[in-house]
Image (cartoon, helix red, strand yellow):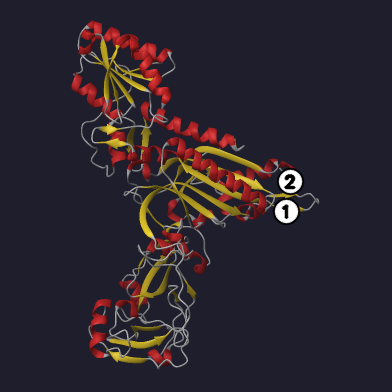
Amino acid sequence: MVLRLSQLFLRTLREDPVDAEVASHKLLVRAGYIRRAAPGIYTWLPLGLSVLRKVERIIREEMAAIGAQEVHFPALLPREPYEATNRWTEYGEGLFRLQDRKGADYLLAPTHEEMFTLLVKDLYSSYKDLPLSLYQIQNKYRDEARPRAGLLRGREFIMKDSYSFDVDDAGLDASYAAHRAAYLKIFERLGLEVIPVAATAGAMGGSKSEEFLHPTEIGEDTFVRSPGGYAANVEAVTTVVPASIDFTDAPPARVLDTPDTPTIETLVAAANQLAPRGDSEGFWSAADTLKNVVLAVTLPTGERQIVVIGVPGDRAVDLKRVEANIGSFLAIAGEIGLEAANEEDLKRNPELVKGYIGPGLELGEAVLGLEGTSKLLYLVDPRVVPGTSWVTGANQEGKHVFGLVAGRDFAWDGVIECTEVRAGDEAPDGSGPLETARGIEMGHIFQLGRKYAEALDLKVLDQNGKQVVVTMGSYGVGVTRAVAALAEANNDERGLVWPRSVAPADVHVVAVGRGEEIFAAAEKLATDLEAAGLEVIYDDRPKVSPGVKFGDAELVGVPTIVAVGRGLVDGVVEIKDRRTGEAENVAVEKAADYVVNAVRQK
């Protein structure tokens, strides 16, 4: 059916919405694809739904091609399955929780691992039933503290999430590879550039994990890549660890008065005045200092825990990397809060002298002169290896210790990947220097292993009649996010420029003028195109100016625009390619065939 603008539920806007920060948000609202219902929550209008359904269709076709079967779970779920996996607590404030009239706890699902696991447990019990891949396309809910960027970071969004069930790890490897290949085909068909990068598993758990990132300056994720092909989210990058140093002949550490030196910059300046280096290095630099950063971690239970991290003074702490890697040291999983410790935190821990904090709070009393010991968790950057010598705080106002040797004068509770990754750092696989870029996460795949199957007792009988725990994989694609990313990557100063694979129509026919013959010719052309199997938007509004009609056509972004107007006097219509801007006059009687051929060739 031809979509007639005189009847279509559509209002375009000339001005950007005041709350819009990125191009996709601005244009999807202005062009009448979505409307804001609440912060991070959007209503889909007819044109938006058309694009969304085409994205879903491509996903469904590629899922079917690898044998995955579609199911559909409710978004409103009971507490008990999430309690069994501890995610009722682990999700923390990110979970929408509610109660029914009887006081029973429910949640709006942020993801559905538990439900998929229980469904398979309910129906399957033998290795003969596996392998199995199930998926759904469903609304998800997360209580984002700062929803922004339109569809890119909302509180309600649509995901395709699929799960594989295999009897052993070899089966999981095969299922993982099949989903990975399907994802690459999905993004290729959408016309959306993505780069698969190594990633951390986070709250999902499991072993191997990869993200599919769409490179763009507005992306929230930072990733790195090397000339030799290494690619990883910065949270998953591992540091090239220097070799340990023999400290047998290292001189003893000494504490010096260093008044008014609470920052790395002031410390370096004072060190070069008070204790000039006598070695080949010539002078102290920030890289010679050990900066001890105090962080406050809010656990899913609400408890606030203080952690101290020692890093080279020339490196900044990356809180996202800390958040991704600190869970194992705290013996917790799930979402945590992370921020720099405040004055109240320091007051509760008087051994932490602001500006002069040093390591070895438990083991370095002889060097640092501490009377008590601390029970605080102390972690270090991988560059802090045995034998390295540092200038760092002496845990006393106005004092620093010089020549403090790691492994001799202080110890640590663990090593954590926590500092910023810089362009030029060496790739961990030796494939060259890293370059950094930003991207939007479009998909994420995980080898979950047996975490959820064990928690929910999903077992099958193997070939020997013994019960074995099923091994699982999890695979997600952001469907609404894909619409936003496509809009972000396909626009110009006039509006959206959709790829033909997802455009709300193949052709946008515009009747330009007031004569009845113009509308009659446009009507016939629109119906001929529709009869030929194309999807057609027809601007048949009788009292709208040509400028507004052309502006709307370019804003809406259909790949081909056909203008029926003054050219009818000469027997031609104008056919314009929205992306290139190239226009051609074609005889009226040949216009339908011309457009059909152009659409099918692309």
In the picture provided, is 143 more to the left or to the right than 27?
right
**Secondary structure category for the residue under label 2:** helix
Q: Check residue 468 in the rendering and tell me which mark sits there, or answer none.
A: 1
Q: Residue at x 51, y 46 (%)?
A: 111
Which badge, 2 or 1, comes first in the chain's sequence?
2
- Tell me, yes or no, if residue 554 can be seen here: yes
The quadrant where residue 156 appears: top left
Cβ atoms at labels 2 and 1 below 8 Å apart: yes
Of the pair 25 and 241, the residue shown nearer to us: 241
Q: Extreme right residue here?
A: 464
In the picture provided, is 516 more to the left or to the right than 247?
left
**Secondary structure category for the residue under label 1:** strand
Residue 266 higher or lower than 69, as above or below? below
In the picture provided, is 210 more to the left or to the right than 251?
right
Residue 459's x, y, as percent?
70, 50
Residue 290 higher or lower than 100, as above or below? below
- Tell me, yes or no, if residue 114 can be seen here: no
Q: Check residue 127 in the rendering and tell me which mark sits there, or answer none.
A: 2
Residue 242's x, y, as percent?
45, 75
Instruction: Give the amino acid at mark 1.
Output: Val
Residue 141's x, y, as percent?
45, 44
Q: Residue at x 34, y 33 (%)?
A: 34
Residue 364's x, y, as percent?
43, 88
